[in-house]
Amino acid sequence: MKFAVKAWNSSGKARSGILQLGNCPGPIETPALLLSTRKGLPHFISPDLLPSLPSPDSHLLQVSPLHFSEGLYPKTISSLGGLNQMLGLPDYAFAAVARDSIQSLPEYNSTNKIGASFETRCGRLLIKPVDYVEMISCMRPNIWATLADEVPAWVSEKRNKTSVDRTVRWLDECIALNSAGGAVIGSIVGGSNVEERERCAQEVSQRSVSGYLIGGFGLGESMEERPALLNAVTDILQEEKPRFVCGLGLPEEVLQGVAAGIDLFDSEYVYHLTLGGIALTFPPGGVEISGSEFHPGYMGSEQTKINLKATIYRKDTSPIVKNCGCYTCQNHTKAYINHLLNVHEMLAQILLEIHNTHHYLQFFRSIREAIKAGEFEKFRQRFIERRRECDDHPDVAAAAVCA
Amino acid sequence: MALRFEILGRFNRARAANLVLPHHVCQTPLFMPVGTQGTIKGLTTNQLEEIGCQIILGNTYHLALRPTSELIDELGGLHKFMNWPRALLTDSGGFQMVSLLHLADITEKGVTFQSPVDGKPMFLTPEESIQIQNRIGADIIMALDDVVKTTITGPRIEEAMYRTLRWIDRCIAAHKRPNEQNLFGIVQGGLDPVLRDICVRGLVDRNLPGYAIGGLAGGEDKDSFWRVVAQCTAALPEDKPRYVMGVGYPLDIVVCSALGADMYDCVYPTRTARFGTALVPEGVLRLKNKVMADDTRPIDPTCDCMVCKNYSRAYIHCLVTVDAMGSQLVSYHNLYYMMKLSRDLHSSIIQGKFPEFVCKFLQRMFPEGDVPEWVCNAMEVAGIDISSCCAPFVSSQG
Ligand SMILES: [Zn+2]
Ligand SMILES: [Zn+2]
């Protein structure tokens, strides 16, 4: 893995960079979105449909090694040649992170000094660093985050301190055990305590790691306290290494992360929208920002997202987003997706995951362009203002919320 | 009539043809996957084209409930609604009602049943079935027939057969788009050769674009099954397509094709995929089985599909029955397998190598030479010599 920051936002910390991963068809520009997967493949997008997404933007996949506890031994994955080979995706890059918010949830109460506990479909699993590194060495992801003790925002100071101590200790153990290669991403925790966040960032940045995973977000902290926590961490981290955050999903949260100097984000937000029958419709390029990214199709679109189960789409023969280049919008109408959702057909999720992923990748592209144009702050402000206007619009709120 | 049936090759009773429909030129013999609610579960329409699907089946009963035939009509028909450029077939809706609902009552006027939506009694007549199918707009539509279980015996079978014949005239009279949609009649008559014969002759008199053999694949013994097919195909006109309804096991398709049938439909390949079962030349592969957990081979090493080219049984083992992707991938393979089987039947008949194909097929499915007796009997009637694969110690030459 190679990473280089190419552009800095003039006033803030937002940055745009280039991430090179051996097998990707080209360098991936950051800030970037990692596609959420289940056992290495997107939840509903089969591998033959994956190339319809923008490339190389879509070539970064996030995988939780714990998903494979459901029926596949690490040794088998190894004999199948690791993730790339097993998944038939030789020109995609995999980033392994133990935790996700869908199927591998950190279970801090059961985590102890021996290992981290997760709630999975196979029940509660206690994963020791040695087991985890064994999984990683069998799967051979391009980058992997060290095991962390992630705790929610409401735990005691003592428990929060313990989580930092453990996470740093496990980092050392993971590095010592790492025999498989792959770039090691050091996990940083510290909950909602700025001092603990700083302490953890200090410790991790002194280790031999290729990048950082800022964990412990999306676990009950408020959006208001987040910038201080993120900045406390990113102020300490070496600038030339990529920073990956898990648990920030909404566009506003992503912008918050970018503003604090984060480079990589997970896409579980897209998964949750897709399951709910929701399609993203906001203009990914905002308004009046960088003319090239302005899509006329978004003119007059007042909604940030729409619930396709709503009866108003029953006869709507237009695509989700006019002029959207994704497979779904090129081939299907809102009326058809509305029908598929009504009759609980899996194709609804397939089509929605394609559109939502495509749409969110476009949003990240716009963010990068704004940073490169030195207009990130303006972009962010306008984006948030516009989203607020939209969501205050009573009709829109009604259409977007009815679930 | 809105179709042409051009026979390109024959081997005894078996035939390979171009079935020219308004939306697609299909090659027979062919298998039609079932897309009950306007989608084949878990596959996109461009994947279906890639797999080689030529015609897919929609269920009138389900589509009439949601999104309703009126809406489909208003939005330009089912082809446009689901964005499927190739051919479509809809059933009459009658079978679904009888099989899904206990409280169906069939009288001369039509079928009465309880709506699963609000419990109110609903009524489907031959006229209504055709009207709904005219709105949906498939290339082939099916007459409403009086469906009885094949395992039933007695006067009910005879009643149903005569009613089916009376209803066909009402269907023909109600059909408003004969130049765009082809109405197929359905041969009924249970397992009784006399009744089947009366029904075939009655339907042939109506000079329909195509004929279906109904009332099979419902639990009757295999010997009765193939004999009915053989009798009907022999009596139906040469120049019209013959569709055996509800048949989808690869072995049944091979036997029926040898007997001169052209079209098949079944939920089996996609339904069984969702339970983790893959179709392979040897029969079936149960991917949920623990022995698959470290099997690094593809589902079928001889298959060229996207799934077999990329994935191991072990990986699919950990997906099936728990992740959507499991049923997506196995459905893809199973339909690919069915389409490949259809293509192989078509091309082997044209190339004059049909018996060789049948023997190879049987050898892989019954490597011990234990070909079921009903298959041997059917093949004898079909004039296909399969002695080379029936012997207990058979050489590997087909
Ligand atoms: Zn789209
Ligand atoms: Zn295959």
Image (cartoon, grey):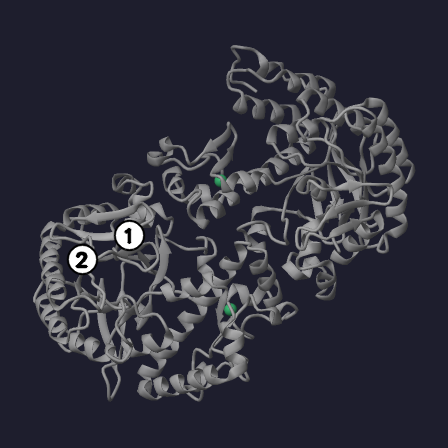
Q: From the Cβ of disc 2, is ligand 1 less than 8 Å away?
A: no
The residue shown at (85%, 32%) is B159
The residue that appears at 41% across and 62% down in the rendered structure is A271
Which numbered disc, 2 or 1, marks the residue closer to the eye? 1
> Height in image: A142 above or below A367?
above
Viewed as shown, does residue B50 lie left or right of B8? left
Residue at image coords 83%, 43%: B209
The chain under label 1 reads: A
x and y percentages locating residue B201 in the rendered image: 89, 31
Asked if the residue at label 1 sits under 8 Å from ligand 1, the reply is no
Q: Mark 2 lies on which chain?
A: A
Q: Which of A114 and A21 is in front in this view?
A: A114
Instruction: Count neighbours of disc 2 (C-alpha within 10 A) and say few if under 14, some if 14 to 19, many if 20 or more.
Output: many
Q: Nearer the viewer, residue B148 or A140?
A: B148
Is A146 rendered above or below residue B224? below
Disc tally is: 2
Which residue carries the number 1 mark?
Answer: A119
Q: In x, y percent, where is residue B137?
A: 75, 56
**Residue that mark 2 sits on:** A146
The answer to whether mark 2 and mark 1 are in CB contact below 8 A is no
Kindly tell me whether residue A264 is visible in this rendering: yes
